[in-house]
Image: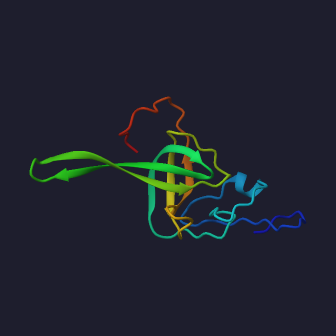
Amino acid sequence: KKSNKGSKAVRWWRNAGLGFRTPKSAIQGKYIDDKCPFTGNVSIRGRILKGVVKTHKMNRTIIVRRDYLHYIKKYNRFEKRHSNTPAHVSPCFRVNEGDNVTIGECRPLSKTVRFNVLNVVSNTEGEKGKQFTAM
């Protein structure tokens, strides 16, 4: 879908698919982002992951922490592990540390970034220090 107003740079938006709605800020916004799944040239395919925002210090990039349990057969117990995944965040999202995000796999956007933020659930509680939370 293309924007209605006639401007020099044609700004358009689309549905990213897989049941994720296009944010209103992507439709009504003025930003131009080639790596945005809603307004850019990126398709979401492959894995869909959930995690917690660890840092958002980079320009349009966040680090998503994913916690999981690893079973140790010898001791018949689980150990806590985590993995950090860098993901591109579009300007249509407002992301803070501790927010729960859904990220989708896409083509390589840079040396390390292979995921794109699709949905953000803001963490209104002040439990930034708590790590292993149920999602």
112 relative to 79 in the view: left or right: right
Q: Position of residue 73 (x, y in %)?
A: 12, 53
Furthest toward the front, the residue is 111
Q: Position of residue 103 (x, y in %)?
A: 50, 57
Q: Is residue 27 above or below residue 133?
A: below
Q: Quadrant of residue 95?
A: top right
118 relative to 46 in the view: left or right: right
Q: Position of residue 81 (x, y in %)?
A: 30, 48
Q: Position of residue 19 (x, y in %)?
A: 55, 62
Quadrant of the snapshot with the N terminus:
bottom right
Q: Quadrant of residue 8?
A: bottom right
Q: Is residue 127 above or below residue 57?
A: above
Colour mapping: rainbow
Decide which of 87, 18 is in the foreground and name it: 87
Residue at x 66%, y 54% (from the top left corner): 23
Residue at x 44%, y 65% (from the top left corner): 47
Decide which of 106, 86 is in the foreground and name it: 86
Furthest toward the top, the residue is 126
Residue at x 69%, y 64% (from the top left corner): 39
Quadrant of the snapshot with the C terminus:
top left
Residue at x 50%, y 45% (from the top left corner): 53
31 relative to 103 in the view: left or right: right
Tell how many labels. 0
Furthest toward the left, the residue is 74
